[in-house]
Image (tube, grey):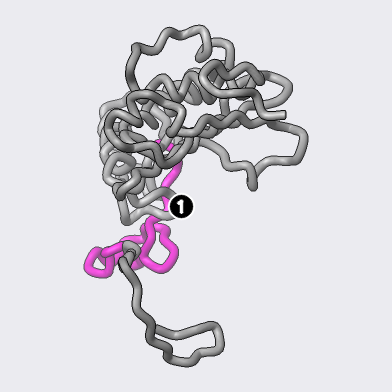
Amino acid sequence: MSNPAGEHVAFEAEKVLVAVGRKANTAALNLNLGGVANEAGKIIVNDHMQTNIKSIYAIGDCVKGHAQLAHAASRMGEIAAENIMGLNTIYDESTNPTCVYMEPEAAAVGLREGQLKAGSYKVGTFPMIANGKALIVNGGEGFIKIIADTKTEKIIGIHMIGPRATDLIAEGAVAIRMGMKVDELTETIHSHPTISEAVREAALSVQGRTLNMPPIK
């Protein structure tokens, strides 16, 4: 591989992570000839998945400015079909989960701390090692983090690493989609023993009252 100086270097490692991106495969569509607005082959659409030509819609990896994920493309397809049939359905990118299927799993939905102004949000975290079910399945690595708006108490971001993270993130997407406040999540009973209890514990941590670990001073 090459280092920052451009020199070729070699070293031994226990594991290698190979990650490649996706590229819009639209060269054969003759978008420019058809008058379809695009940038470097990525089709520009509105939140109805409609192009600049009202009768043409586009979804998935070929559109500009949206996550290139299977579940995102599937939802885009539903929205395009509904709008073609005369409904008025809008695509909401803010509740689109991002998942990394590795060991441990990682997932996120909503905003990150780096996107927010200091003082406008508060954070609660809960380590997986304090969750009974995570220990049962030998998955004590990782944590769950919940970000909430300081003024409204609404949940605006959930990030997690650990067992079943790519399944649990759906709860976070629902919370953000429905404008759920931290209280509404903490007041929801989560079955025991489950890893989902860690989501509620993270919400309790936002309020400084986590049950299953000592308070951080």
Q: Residue furthest left?
A: 28
Q: Position of residue 173 (x, y in %)?
A: 43, 28
Which residue is found at the position 54% from the left and 16% from the top? Answer: 211
Which residue is found at the position 44% from the left and 64% from the top? Answer: 39
Q: Position of residue 190 (x, y in %)?
A: 39, 12
> In the image, is 37 to the left or to the right of 137?
right
**Label tally:** 1
User: Which residue is denoted by mark 1 in the rendering?
Assistant: 65
Which residue is found at the position 41% from the left and 34% from the top? Answer: 91
Q: Is residue 97 magenta?
A: no
Give the residue type that dot 1 points to. Answer: Gly
Mark 1 neighbour class, 10 Å CA radius: few under 14, some 14 to 19, many 20 or more:
few
- Note whether residue 191 is visible: yes
Which residue is found at the position 50% from the left and 25% from the top? Answer: 176
Q: Residue furthest bottom?
A: 7
**74 lies above or below 189:** below
Q: Quadrant of the C terminus?
A: top right
Please report the bounds of the magenta region as a residue range: 23-48
Q: Quadrant of the N terminus?
A: bottom left
**143 lies above or below 67:** above
**183 lies above or below 26:** above
> In the image, is 36 to the left or to the right of 182?
left
**118 lies above or below 191:** below
Q: Position of residue 204 (x, y in %)?
A: 57, 18
Q: Is residue 29 magenta?
A: yes
Q: Nearer the viewer, residue 14 or 4?
A: 14
> In the image, is 136 to the left or to the right of 211?
left
